[in-house]
Structure formats: structure tokens, C-alpha cells
Image: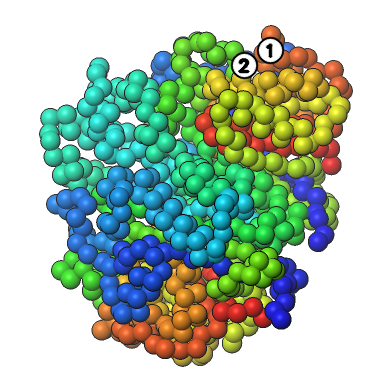
């Protein structure tokens, strides 16, 4: 079987740091990079909020914008950024044959309606009847679609005309890992020539925070870097709103079209370690060892801050002695499904620009002295389950 | 001897194990018996009160241990039961050893737990109270029920599948997509076998209300078993239902080498997204047409290569009309005589599981030589000229099947299956 190299030709990224490659590069390579935080709205939980976005730039029809909640709007917007960045946004033949794999959660519920139902339930015993009464009259018909996991991809098809295929993977960070692995494997094997892959997450929603807090995963109180949250109040995760979409292509496909190539996407590995004892740490170490990184290598870590998983990853990253880690989530917050796509985007940017990011944590991260990085390790170790890593290399 | 590679030089993918659960019953045998007898699994809703609801019927699976324990628990049990039957039929012992692809509904915190948390919480009104209580209780069960990766993770533990399991949603096409992902992985040479499962136990009151608000459901409540009437003139929506199906997919070479019984071949998969509307298909049907054609191409078959169509056939005015248009466009005049039937007339619309369940019935159709009927076909839609195998099953020699799955969000996925390898 002929194997095709996979290259990254388009990057769309949005986080609290801004929108697009330049904004992120500038924010992250500033002499003293500072995260953007909102500590008020969801106190005691800090969140990294979305920047101001003119949705119309990528979603011109107001009607389309109204059909989505923030998460879908953000993903659809960021997918547009990636297509635009690759210079293919108006190439109808190309996008209509483009494959799409989206990693998605969902469920941005109507909080006032839910609270109204919950408040009423305190004085009534017939909860099931109450639900029927309230939901039949108060739910907005369009809200269901705005919550459905596969409707982020559906909206990307409608707004950007990406229609070659549409697959949505679910399952927190692992979904982002699988989406990337899957899209890349299809291109390598010749099952696909060009693909859009990515994810979006809206942290500024109480139900999204609830998803973490049901197991006490959220960090509380003043912000700390991702490596310095163990021992602090809460569970270590500071959620962030953000999204990352990548245009992946077979190298020959991109070359034939004369497109700019950011970097090559090397192997993508995924796993489901049993997290007993040192199971996770050993699994991460084995995954990293499998890449055969002998030289000094920059690592964009998607460590969530969740105490146990982050400690395991930290040990696995420190042990080989040649990895220089940057904890992405210190700056962006935890982007859930988008963790690995975002880390890969930052890595591709650094490879393309021929420079590394300075430490995001002066105490826990070493300076980089290796010149232009030609290969960067990226990781996304799930806060609760599943893990993955990918190599981004000079094309 | 059968060739181990197909027309495109790829490994041929065989099915060596099948499991099914629907409202008709547990397991292949029970389901097949009911399905070919034209029996309906649609009934009045008993799981929750139906006051204020426009639709009071469904095809829920009410006979499992976790039938009343919420969507996550029931979806897991449905998936586990189907996968267990499939793995047993494939005669595999020990760890499964291949990847898992699970089609299942999106999850969220169920109302029962939401009510309980809120009732136990102290402090002022609002969402903060819920978050505080959530952190305080730190309940692994409730937490797990809200994580999208949980069900597949537990299935991976249960069956010893390899690697990070994929949980996917392509709405009502999900079950077909799970099979497609397994087929592609085997064709890439990543594995010799894969476990593909579609399961949906999400028929809650809120789910019903949501679909009602989109005017998608039948409100013909008087005679539940008559409500799902695909291709009929008086069809008025689908009937919400639950179920699951699982497949052991295996390269034919691998299956042959270990002496496994081959139950059928997945010959081709095709898909195409629709960019027209969130719930309606493009008026010219071009995405569905492209998906059917892509599946035929992938299978290396022409329009004369299909003996029977297992329809998506939801019984909504829109779907059945568009499905007819798409098929008539691809198959031309011949479409008037190709038998086509909708399993949904009996089991309702099992959403994330539908594509998988209907693929399972498609394989059994070929193997048993019996086409399940489209029941409740008493008032044909004159605009839809099809041989829908009305009301009673039909003995037929079927060697190839096209199974359609179309979903909200512009999802179109089609599978071409064959009784035997070429």
C-alpha cells in the first residue's frame, strides 16, 4: 500500500488569547505571557473567556448564527478560519469533496428553563409531571439542534459547504485524539486526500462546568499554572473557551495545489490506560518512548491540571531528560475535546516560524535553547480517561 | 475459493457475529421471528407519564434490568447485550483484541439525578447550588453518566477491545457509520477484526418532547402498532424507539483462517453530507443520491447489482418522499421492481442504533432468504411507487442489499452488503 505523508495546510484557532495564528503567536511569545481570565462570573471557578468575536466574519447569515449556541458558533467560526487560512474557503470543488471529522461534546442546555424546573421541583412531589408541563411549554424547538453533538459538523456543512463526509466523535479529550488519528490514518492510507478536523469548547456555561465538577475536577480560587495546582483548593482544571480546526492534506495533494505547508503531522498515538497505581504514567512513558525522540525536543503538553493525570504526565515528560515541556492549558485553559487539535496547531505554528515558545511557568518549565524546533511532541492526557500524543515535524 | 481482496485490492470484510436487541425482543432469533411475522414492537409509553405530551407511544426496550435507570445505563446494557451475542456467535474467547466503534446518543446529566442533587443542595437559587452539591457528593456514578466516553470505556473493559475506543455520532446514521469505521480500519490493515456497535437507550420524556417540538414524531396514538407506516399516504412522523446491534467484523482472510462461519460481507460504504438545512434534505436529493452512488462504487457494483433495499423509511412525510426520489434517480425504472422495506414500520426509529440494527436485519434477510415486510401499508402514497413488500414477509433469493441511513445535520450513510464473497 502506498503511504502518504500528512501535512497541515490550514490552522484556525480561537481562545481567550485571541483569534488566529498571529494573535496566538504574539501572545504566547511575549516576554512575560499572561493568561486571560474571568474570575468573577463563575466564581469560585476561574474560566478563560472567549475574546470578542465578530461572528459575521465567518458566519455571514444571522439566521445561521441564531440556529446555534456558543459552542457550535465557535466551532463553525473557527472551521471557517482554518479554511480561510489554507486559502481554500471559496474553492467549492475542494470543500465539497473535503472529509470532516469533528470531536464534540454538546448539551449547552437552557439554564434558566432548567433552574425554573428545579426550583418548582422543591415544592412538588410529581417531578415527572412537572417535567412534561414545563418542557412542553418552555423549551425552544431549535435548542435541541443547538445541543446535538453532530450538529457542529452539520453547521460547518451548511455554512462552509464541507460535504465530502461528516463524522463526529465524542468522548472528551479522547475524541479529539481519535478525530486527529482517524483523519490522518485515512489520508495516509489513501482513503482521503484532504480533511478538516477539529473541535470547540465553550467553558462559559454552568452545565459545562458541572460536567467536571460532578467529580470535583475544577480548580478554585486564584489562578496557578497547570503544573502548580496540586495542593490548591479544588481539582486542578481551569476550563477555557476555545477551538482548533486544522486542514490536513496528503503532501502530494497540497504540493500539487501549491499550498503553504505549516508542518508534517507525524504519528498520532492513542491509548486507554488503566489508571491504577502507576498505570497512566507508564502508559504515557511508553507512548513517548515509541516516538524515538533522541534529541532535545519541545513538548506542547495538553495537561489538564487534574491532579493525578497531570502528575503522571509530568513525571513521564521529565524522566527521559530531553523533553522541554510547555503546559498549554496554563495559557488557554482546558479546552476539552479541542486539547490535542489545539496543541498540534501551536506545534505546527512553532515549527513553521522556526522558534519555540518561552516558558509559561518560570519555575516548572525550562527555557528552550535548541534553535528552530524541527519536531515537537504534543500530548492530550485525559483528565479522567483516555490519552493521546502526536508528533509535529518539519515538512 | 473466495478471493480475500476486493475489486480495489483491499481486504474483503466479513461479518462473523451479530447481536440484536429491539422492542421486539432479545437476540437474533427472537427478533427475526417477530420481524418476519410482521409483528410491531410499538406500544404505549409506560416509562414516564404522558400527560401534556402530543405523542404517547414509543418502541422503548422495557425488559432490561436498567430500562428505568436513565439513558447512559440503558444504552450501556443494550450495547453489552448485543455485543455479547455477536462475540459469542463469532466464537471468540478471551480478549476481543480489535478496536471498538460505538454509535451511541450524546449524554447529559439526567433529570432524576439533577432533581436529587438540587433537592439535597443548600444555599441560594440557581446553578451555583447545583455545582456546589455536585462537587460535595462527588458521585462516580453520576459523573460517569455525563461523560461521553464512559459507555465505550466500560465496553472496552468488558470485551477486551484494543486501544482507545471511538464513540461516534452521525445522528440517525450513526449505526451505519460505526460499521463503516470498522470496515475502513480493516481495509487499512490496522486490525484483523473490529467490534462495531450501535446502541440507543435515550427515549426519555425530554427526548420525546424535543423531537415533538421539531414536529418529527407521529401523533397517531390510538393504535400504537399502526402508527409507523412508512411510504403510506397518511404517515405523519416517526416513532421514537430504542435498541442495539453489534457486529464482529473480520477480514475474510482472517475469518477463513480460523474457520469462522461467515454471515455476510460488508462490500461497500458511502457517505455524503448535505449543506442545505439542519433537518431537511436538499430538494433535489443530491446528497442522498451521492451517498448511494458512493456505496455502490465502493462495493464495485452497478445499479443492477442490488437485489433489495433496506430503507431508512422513517415514516416522516419528508424522509420517505426524499428517499424515494433519491432511489428512483439512482436506479431509474428498475426501482419500481426492486423490493424495498422498512424495519422501522415494526421497531420504530432507534436513532443512533438504527443503521446497525437495520444492517443486521439486512444480513439476516440474505442468509434466511426472507424479506421482512413494511407493515401498516394499507393506504399507499400514490406519489411513491415502490414494491415495499407490503404487510407480509416474502421468500426471496437475495444476494446483495443496500441499507440507507439518513440523519439530522445532513448525515447520509449507505452500506452495501452481500451474502457471499465474490
Task: Reply above or below: B260 against B117.
Answer: below
Asked whether disc 1 touches disc 2, contact meaning CB atoms under 8 Å apart, the reply is yes
Q: What element carries label 2?
A: helix
Q: What element carries label 1?
A: loop
Q: Residue at (54%, 69%) from the top-left corner?
A: B414
Residue A331 % position (x, y): 61, 21
- The image quarter in which residue B343 lies: bottom left
Q: Any mark on residue A364, and which?
A: 1
Q: The disc numbered 2 marks a residue on which chain?
A: A
Residue B44 % position (x, y): 19, 62
Q: Residue at (46%, 89%) from the top-left corner?
A: B396
Q: Residue at (78%, 23%) from the top-left corner?
A: A320
Residue on which disc 2 sits:
A227
Q: Which of B81 and B9 is in front in this view?
A: B81
The numbered mark, 1 or 2, whose residue comes first in the sequence reads: 2
Whether residue B213 is visible to the viewer of this picture, yes or no, is: no
Residue A74 % position (x, y): 52, 39
> Does A197 sit left or right of B204 as displayed?
right
State the quadrant of the C terminus of chain B. bottom right
- The image quarter in which residue B372 lies: bottom left
Task: Reply above or below: B326 against A200.
Answer: below
Q: The disc numbered 1 marks a residue on which chain?
A: A
> Does B73 sit left or right of B268 as displayed?
left
Q: How crowded is mark 2: few (under 14 residues within 10 Å), some or many (20 or more)?
A: many
**Marks 1 and 2, how far apart at CA:** 7 Å
Amino acid at each position: 500500500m502506498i503511504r502518504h505523508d500528512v501535512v497541515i495546510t490550514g490552522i484556525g484557532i480561537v481562545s481567550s488569547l485571541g483569534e488566529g495564528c498571529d494573535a496566538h503567536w504574539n501572545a504566547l511569545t511575549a516576554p512575560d505571557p499572561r493568561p486571560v481570565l474571568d474570575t468573577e462570573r463563575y466564581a469560585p471557578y476561574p474560566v478563560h473567556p472567549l475574546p470578542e468575536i465578530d461572528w459575521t466574519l465567518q458566519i455571514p447569515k444571522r439566521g445561521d448564527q441564531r440556529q446555534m449556541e456558543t459552542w457550535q458558533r465557535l466551532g463553525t467560526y473557527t472551521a471557517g478560519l482554518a479554511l480561510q487560512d489554507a486559502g481554500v474557503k471559496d474553492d467549492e470543488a475542494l470543500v465539497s469533496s473535503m472529509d470532516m471529522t469533528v470531536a464534540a461534546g454538546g448539551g449547552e442546555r437552557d439554564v434558566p428553563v432548567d433552574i425554573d424546573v428545579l426550583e418548582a421541583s422543591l415544592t412538588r412531589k410529581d417531578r415527572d409531571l412537572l417535567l412534561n408541563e414545563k418542557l412542553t411549554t418552555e423549551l425552544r424547538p431549535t435548542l435541541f439542534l443547538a445541543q446535538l453533538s453532530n450538529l457542529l459538523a452539520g453547521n460547518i456543512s451548511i455554512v462552509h459547504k464541507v460535504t465530502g463526509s461528516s463524522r463526529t466523535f465524542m468522548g472528551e479529550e479522547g475524541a479529539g485524539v481519535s478525530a486527529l488519528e482517524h483523519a490522518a490514518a485515512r489520508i495516509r492510507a489513501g482513503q482521503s486526500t484532504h480533511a478538516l478536523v477539529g473541535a470547540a469548547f465553550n467553558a462559559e456555561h454552568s452545565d459545562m462546568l458541572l460536567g467536571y465538577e460532578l467529580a470535583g475536577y475544577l480548580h478554585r480560587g486564584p489562578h496557578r499554572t497547570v503544573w502548580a495546582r496540586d495542593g490548591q483548593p479544588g481539582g486542578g482544571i481551569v476550563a477555557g473557551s476555545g477551538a482548533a480546526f486544522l486542514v490536513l492534506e496528503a503532501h502530494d495533494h497540497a504540493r500539487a495545489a501549491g499550498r503553504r505547508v505549516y508542518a508534517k503531522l507525524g504519528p498520532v498515538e492513542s491509548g486507554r490506560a488503566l489508571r491504577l497505581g502507576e498505570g497512566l504514567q507508564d502508559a504515557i512513558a511508553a507512548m513517548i518512548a515509541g516516538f524515538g525522540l533522541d534529541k532535545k525536543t519541545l513538548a506542547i503538553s495538553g495537561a489538564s491540571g487534574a491532579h493525578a493525570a497531570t502528575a503522571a504526565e509530568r513525571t513521564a515528560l521529565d524522566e527521559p531528560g530531553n523533553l522541554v515541556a510547555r503546559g498549554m492549558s496554563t495559557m488557554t485553559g482546558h479546552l476539552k475535546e479541542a486539547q490535542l487539535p489545539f496543541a498540534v496547531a501551536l506545534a505546527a505554528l512553532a515549527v513553521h516560524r522556526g522558534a519555540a515558545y518561552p516558558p509559561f511557568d518560570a519555575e516548572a518549565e525550562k527555557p528552550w535553547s535548541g534553535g528552530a524546533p524541527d519536531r515537537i511532541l504534543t500530548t492530550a492526557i485525559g483528565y479522567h480517561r483516555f490519552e493521546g500524543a502526536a508528533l509535529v515535524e518539519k515538512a | 475459493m473466495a478471493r480475500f481482496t476486493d475489486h480495489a485490492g483491499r481486504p474483503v470484510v466479513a461479518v462473523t457475529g451479530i447481536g440484536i436487541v429491539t422492542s421486539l425482543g432479545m437476540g437474533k432469533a427472537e427478533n427475526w421471528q417477530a420481524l418476519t411475522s410482521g409483528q410491531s414492537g410499538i406500544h404505549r409509553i409506560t416509562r414516564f407519564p404522558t400527560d401534556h405530551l402530543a405523542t404517547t407511544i414509543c418502541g422503548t426496550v422495557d425488559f432490561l434490568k436498567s430500562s428505568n435507570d436513565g439513558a447512559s445505563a440503558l444504552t450501556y446494557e443494550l450495547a453489552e447485550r448485543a455485543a455479547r451475542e455477536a462475540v459469542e456467535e463469532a466464537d471468540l474467547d478471551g480478549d476481543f483484541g480489535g478496536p471498538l466503534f460505538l454509535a451511541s446518543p450524546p449524554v447529559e446529566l439526567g433529570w432524576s439525578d439533577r432533581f436529587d442533587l438540587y433537592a439535597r443542595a443548600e444555599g441560594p437559587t440557581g446553578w451555583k447550588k447545583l455545582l456546589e452539591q455536585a462537587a460535595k457528593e462527588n458521585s462516580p456514578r453520576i459523573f460517569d453518566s455525563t461523560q461521553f466516553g464512559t459507555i465505550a470505556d466500560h465496553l472496552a473493559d468488558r470485551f477486551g477491545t484494543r486501544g482507545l475506543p471511538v464513540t461516534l455520532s452521525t445522528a440517525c446514521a450513526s449505526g451505519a457509520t460505526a460499521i463503516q469505521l470498522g470496515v475502513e480500519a480493516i481495509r487499512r490493515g490496522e486490525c484483523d477484526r473490529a467490534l462495531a456497535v450501535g446502541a440507543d437507550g435515550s427515549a426519555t420524556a425530554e427526548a420525546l418532547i424535543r423531537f415533538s417540538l421539531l414536529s418529527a414524531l407521529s401523533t397517531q396514538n390510538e393504535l400504537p402498532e399502526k402508527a409507523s407506516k412508512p411510504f403510506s399516504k397518511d404517515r405523519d412522523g416517526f416513532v421514537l424507539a430504542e435498541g442495539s446491534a453489534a457486529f464482529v467484523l473480520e477480514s475474510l482472510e482472517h475469518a477463513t483462517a480460523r474457520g469462522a462461519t461467515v454471515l455476510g460481507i460488508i462490500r461497500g460504504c458511502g457517505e455524503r453530507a448535505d449543506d442545505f438545512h439542519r433537518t431537511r434534505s436538499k430538494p433535489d436529493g443530491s446528497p442522498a443520491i451521492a451517498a448511494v452512488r458512493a456505496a455502490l462504487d465502493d462495493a464495485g457494483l452497478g445499479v443492477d447489482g442490488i437485489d433489495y433495499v433496506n430503507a431508512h423509511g422513517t415514516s416522516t412525510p419528508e424522509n420517505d418522499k426524499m428517499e424515494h426520489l433519491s432511489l428512483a434517480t439512482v436506479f431509474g425504472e428498475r426501482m419500481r421492481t426492486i423490493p424495498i422495506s422498512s424495519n422501522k414500520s415494526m421497531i420504530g426509529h432507534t436513532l443512533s442504533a438504527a443503521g446497525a440494527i437495520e444492517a443486521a436485519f439486512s444480513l439476516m434477510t440474505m442468509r434466511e432468504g426472507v424479506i421482512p415486510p413494511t407493515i401498516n401499508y394499507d393506504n399507499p402514497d400514490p406519489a411513491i411507487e415502490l414494491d415495499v413488500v407490503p404487510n407480509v414477509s416474502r421468500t426471496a433469493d437475495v444476494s446483495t442489499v443496500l441499507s440507507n441511513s439518513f440523519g439530522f445535520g445532513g448525515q447520509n450513510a449507505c452500506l452495501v452488503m452481500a451474502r457471499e464473497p465474490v
